[in-house]
Amino acid sequence: MSTTTDPLPFAATARVVNDLEATLDSPWFRLITRINAELVHASGDFYRARDISPVLMPITVNSVSSPMGLGSDSLPVRIDLFGDPTYLADSMQFQLEFMLRMGLPGAYYIMPTFRGEDPDSSHLNQFFHSEAEIAGGLDDVMRLVEGYVTALCSRLLDSPVADDIADVAGGLDHVVDLAGRTRFPEVTFDEACALVDPEHVEDRGSGVRTITRAGELQLIERFGGVVWLTRMPENAVPFYQAGGGDGTALCADLLLGLGEVAGCGERHTTRADTERAIVGHDVDPADYEWYLRMKELAPLRSAGFGLGLERFLAWVLRHHDIRDMHLMPRLKGVPTWM
C-alpha cells in the first residue's frame, strides 16, 4: 500500500490506496482531483460550442451494449433491483441514441459505467465514461473525437495544474504534441495485423481475430504516440456497429498510452440491418426489442464514441496502471473503506 511519504509519480506497479488517512494526505490524489475538474469543465465547454447537449439518464439498463456474443469481450453487471433483474450500465450508447430522437443534434454525458471482468492495469470495474452520440457517420465522429482530445490537452496546458502534471509526467511534450495536431494517423485492422508481431494477433475462434494489448502498444510506438485502428472485422466487434459492406465494421479505436482510450463507430440506421446484425452475432433479438422498435419508428443515421477518462488521465501522467486513478477505489474482490 502507498504511504503519505511516497514520491510522485507512483511506480509502474499498481499500489492502490484503499485507506482513508492515506488518501486524505496524498498529493497524488489531490492532483488527480484537480485534473479531473479541468477535464469535466473542458468537456462542457467543448460540447456547448458544438451544440451537443448534456443529458441525464439512469445508471440501470435493461439492454447492455456488450452482451455475451460475437464481438463482445466484457462482462455485464447484473443486479436485483427491488425484485426486478436489471443491469448496471456498461455504456449509455443505446440511451444516447434514444436521446437524439428527442430533437438533439448531439448528446453527451460523463458518469460511471460498470464492467464485470477482473480489473487489471488497463481495466476497471467502475470507470468514468465520457460518451457522445451525434447525427452523422464514422468520419464525423472520428473528427469529433480528435477535436475533443486536443481540446482536453489544450485545457490542461493552459490550466493551473500544468506545472504539477509536468513534474509527475517528466514533462509536457506528449500533451503539447497532441494539442497541436488536427488529425491523427490511421491504420486499418488488416494493415495493422501485418505490422505487429504475429503473436499479437489472436484467433478467438469462429474466424474472429483481434489484436492484443501488446500489439496495440506496438502500433502506438510505430505511429508516433497515437493512431486510429479502423475497419475491424464485423464479427470482432459488437452487433451495433454498422457494416462497411466488405465484412468490416464502420468503427475505429483510438490507441494512446495504455492502448485503446476511445472507441467509436457508426450505428445501423434501420431495424432490418440491426436485427440482421444481432442474429449474426448470436444475440437474442428479444433482449433488444425496444432498440429494434426505435430503429423502426425513427430511423436515424448516427455515430458515437466512448472515452475512458482514467485511461486518458494515465496517459497524461505517463502512468502505467489505471487502478491508481481512483480516490475511492471500486475493484472487484477488494473491500473499500468508503
Image (cartoon, rainbow, N blue to C red):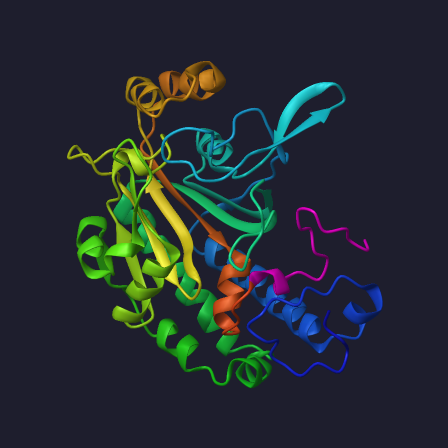
Q: Position of residue 158 (x, y in %)?
A: 51, 78
> Is 196 in the magenta?
no
In the rendered view, tell whether residue 318 sits above or below residue 171. Answer: above
Percent across and percent down for residue 38 are 58, 67
Please give left or right for residue 166 compared with residue 338 in the image. Answer: left
Q: In front: 200, or 321?
A: 200
Residue 333 located left or right of residue 141: right
Residue at 42% over, 16% down: 285
Overall secondary structure of the magenta stretch?
Answer: loop
Q: Please give the name of the residue rendered at 53% of the width and 83% of the height, measured from the top-left corner.
A: 166
Q: Residue at x 24, y 60 (%)?
A: 196
- In the rendered image, residue 276, in percent from the top left (x then y), is placed at 29, 19
Q: Is residue 334 magenta?
A: yes
The image quadrant where one finds the N terminus is: bottom right
Q: Residue furthest left?
A: 246
Q: Residue furthest right?
A: 21
x%, y% of residue 80?
71, 25
Write the start and end of the magenta stretch as one range. Answer: 322-338
- 147 relative position to 130: left or right: left
The quarter holding residue 192 reads bottom left
In the shown orientation, is residue 164 left or right of residue 282?
Answer: right
**Residue nearest the observer in this picture, 188 or 145:** 188
Q: Residue at x 66, y 51 (%)?
A: 331
The image shows a total of numbered marks equal to 0
Q: Nearer the viewer, residue 299 or 247?
A: 247
Q: Is residue 199 above or below residue 246?
A: below
Q: Residue furthest front?
A: 199
